[in-house]
Amino acid sequence: MADASSVNPQNGFCSKTKVFHSLRSPAPLPPLSQPLSITDYAISFLRSDPAFSPSTTDFLIDSATGHLALILSPTSIHIPVLYFSLLSIGVTVSPVNPLSTKSELTDLVGLSNPVIAFATSSVASKLPSSFPLGTIIIDSPQFLSMLRNPHSNFSSQLVKQSDTAGILYSSGTTGRIKGVELTHRNFIAITSAAQNNRFMKDGNAPYEHPVSLFPLPLFHVFGFFMLIRAASVGETLVLMERFDFENMLKAVEKYKVTYMPVSPPLVVAMAKSDLVPKYDLSSLLLIGCGGAPLGKEVAKSFSARFPNVDVVQGYGMTETGGGVTGMNGPDECEHHGSAGRLSPNVEAKIVDPETGEALSPMQQGELWLRGPMVMKGYVRNKEASAATLDSEGWLKTGDLCYFDSDGFLYIVDRLKELIKYKAYQVAPAELERYLQAIPEVADAAVIPYPDEDAGEIPMAYIVRRPGSKINEAQIMEIIAKQVSPYKKIRKVAFINTIPKTPAGKILRRELVKHALSR
Ligand code: AYL
């Protein structure tokens, strides 16, 4: 920790240590030795509501505590209760995209080793059948009776903050998908940092009747974090089972929604769509946008259409359990291109990727983060964990960034191998594996290609085997059958050789340049 007096009060930069600190006072955290689940930490507001009693049967407490539950379900009103219940009895929660294919699910199950699965009847058949405690169907009487059993004698004193609370999935900076291990302490820390960050343009006044609407899925870190945050600040939550833009507008009007956490394509749609003027959206006060870059021009055209709605960006990663910047002062709404200021308890460094040297404000380098919200590591993957977390606890984000002289973070580019289709992660290495398995393909590489609606789409460069006439549509169709819809390859180009380093690493930047110059 830097000596507080050496930290610049304007931008949080400590010139001695080259570390950036939050300008806000540290958020208080409970002593680490106190047994505490994220449920008990977050839901004090809900506990005072007599209608709410998260519970599970004693069967689960005896047999699943300390183990992992896989959850495969579209958003439903049962999901928050299920997450909070399982977390309260020390079951690790691992939510998965319900659109995943069978082979993707087999990979994930192999990674995280669940003892039980919870799934809706519409998707359960995609799961392997081999869970020791079976599969519980969420839309069944059995599940509902579990939720209605309020008399569990489990002692929440048994959950330690250092226990694993969630395993979410990310491809990290390189390679294929990994299980991100997040502890109760990680979620307590990210929640405590977010608890006091509501603000309005004219000061720090909290909203009188906060209502938030999630158009985002609850299996992704953004939704998971926003759910815990909303519970912990006592917001009314409006959830959407299936995203539909017009239904979302209707819900804002009907429930007088004040706040929406969204990803960039939704800000684009709100700024442009002809449906917007049909609805009374005057309750909206704040849009929090994160997960992928939001263009400055998009933010400006949104603000022109909604002059009374603040737009702030937040930056975060699965590996930090939620957002580590954003909503840390009213002036963030005036800095459209920035991802906001650091939240309490987060430290940051900007590191020269070549020399490893820590840099000053206005200099670009890789963003490194440290704080109690940073993941424990990638589950059963020591190599990737060691490459991402250094011995001093710094998380290497793989994002090229800088801080300006007022402490605002700017995300310039991605150094890591990651495509963001909307806010979803697509790992090039995973698609390359599928492409290389096609007999007519000699070699392949996948890169991000810019797209107005999605931000980026996965594009494949293919080297055909001699004599092969396989075409763009055939390649796209073969892959579409094997992956979740957001991972589909949406553009293909043919090339004679894939450019590589002498060590065999794909030179993706060269391919991106090539794609853009076509
Ligand atoms: P993951 N601007 C630009 N890129 C961003 C931003 C942003 N505001 N936020 C995230 N990214 C990119 O694990 C960046 O490359 O989590 C980062 O390394 O799917 C990567 O997305 C992480 O992708 C919030 C705000 C949660 C954000 C999030 C994280 C969602 C994405 C809660 O309040």
Image (cartoon, helix red, strand yellow):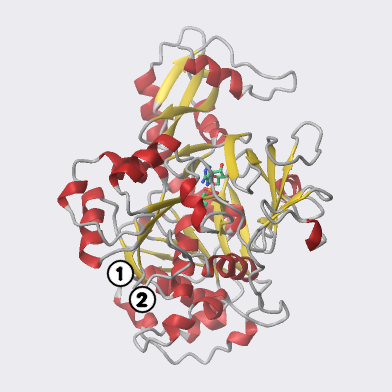
The reply to whether residue 417 is in sight is: no
Q: Is residue 396 above or below residue 185?
A: above
Q: What amino acid is found at the position of numbered circle 2 in the picture?
A: Phe
Residue on which the image places disc 1: 139
Q: CA distance from mark 1 to mark 2?
A: 7 Å
Q: Left or right: where does residue 449 sit relative to residue 139?
A: right
The percent coordinates of residue 191 (x first, y second) are: 55, 68
Q: What amino acid is found at the position of numbered circle 1 in the picture?
A: Asp
Total residue callouts: 2
Give the quarter of the image for residue 412: top right
Q: Secondary structure at mark 1?
A: loop
Residue on which the image places disc 2: 143
Front-lying residue, 396 or 235: 235
Dot 1 beta carbon under 8 Å from ligand 1 = no
The percent coordinates of residue 385 (x first, y second) are: 72, 50
Q: Is residue 227 above or below residue 480?
A: below
What residue is rendered at 64% in x and 62% in y?
A: 373
The percent coordinates of residue 131 (x first, y second) are: 50, 65
- Asked whether the residues under the numbered discs 1 and 2 touch, taking CB atoms below 8 Å apart as contact, a structural biologist would say yes
Q: Left or right: where does residue 500 sit relative to residue 418?
A: right
Q: Left or right: where does residue 262 sit relative to residue 181?
A: left
What residue is rendered at 48% in x and 74% in y?
A: 232
Front-lying residue, 67 or 498: 498
The quarter of the picture where the N terminus appears is bottom right
The quarter of the picture where the C terminus appears is top left
Q: Is residue 328 above or below residue 475?
A: below
Residue 207 is labelled as none
Dot 2 beta carbon under 8 Å from ligand 1 = no
